[in-house]
Amino acid sequence: MRAKFVAALAGWLITLPVVGAEAKPADGQAVFDGTCAVCHQAGGKGMAGLAPPLAGTLGPLLTRKEGRSYIAQVLVHGLSGRIVAQGQTFNLAMPPQAALSDADLAAAANYVARELNGSTGPAFVDADIVAARAAKLSHKELRALREGLLQ
């Protein structure tokens, strides 16, 4: 009986967090490089005809709450259809990245916002991604939102 108790106690103890150990924040550039750069290329420079550039192009979206919401929703739900970015037309089909964790998506959004666009606004947080997951805008509605925000 005592051996079973000790084994159960040992099993329980290894599930406890280590005191002082903290969750390591997601590395936004690593998430971007491993997922987004396939199409948007390293440094977010984009790929003509396939994926619009993200570097230096999102400033107008990052300064408004609705724009930040749009970015989070595109990360979660993807985007398809025709958009214009930096004078180039893209008829794209960005797949949703909903399989990534809230922390990873927020980190990737922060990398794009801060490192690639020089934003000094509030950081994207998990709650932004949670809200984007709950929003159920169609791709058509997302494109219309984008056009309205960029005018």
Image (cartoon, rainbow, N blue to C red):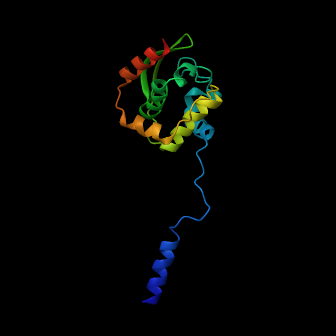
Rendered view: 35 above or below 140: below
| Residue found farthest to the bottom | 1
Q: Which residue: 59% across, 56% down?
A: 22
- At x 44%, y 84%, the residue is 4
Residue drawn at 62 percent across, 21 percent down: 56
- In the image, 24 versus 32, the foreground residue is 24
Quarter of the figure with residue 82: top left
Hey, which quadrant is residue 18 in on the image?
bottom right
Q: Is residue 2 above or below residue 47?
A: below
Say above or below: 24 vs 33. Answer: below
Q: Is residue 143 left or right of residue 89?
A: left
Position of the N terminus by quadrant: bottom left
Query: Which percent across, then down, holds residue 9?
Result: 48, 78
Please indicate whether residue 129 sits to the left or right of residue 118 in the image.
Answer: left
Q: Between residues 45 and 26, which one lies in front from this camera angle?
A: 26
In this view of the protein, which residue sits in the foreground, 93 or 102? Answer: 102
Q: Nearer the viewer, residue 89 or 131?
A: 131
- Spot occupied by residue 148 in the image (x, y as percentages of width and height): 43, 15
Q: Position of residue 51 (x, y in %)?
A: 53, 22
6 displayed left or right of 41: left
Residue 149 place in picture, x, y as percent: 46, 17
Q: Viewed as shown, does residue 131 lie left or right of 112?
A: left
Q: Residue at point 65% right, 26% down?
A: 118
Q: How many numbered callouts?
A: 0
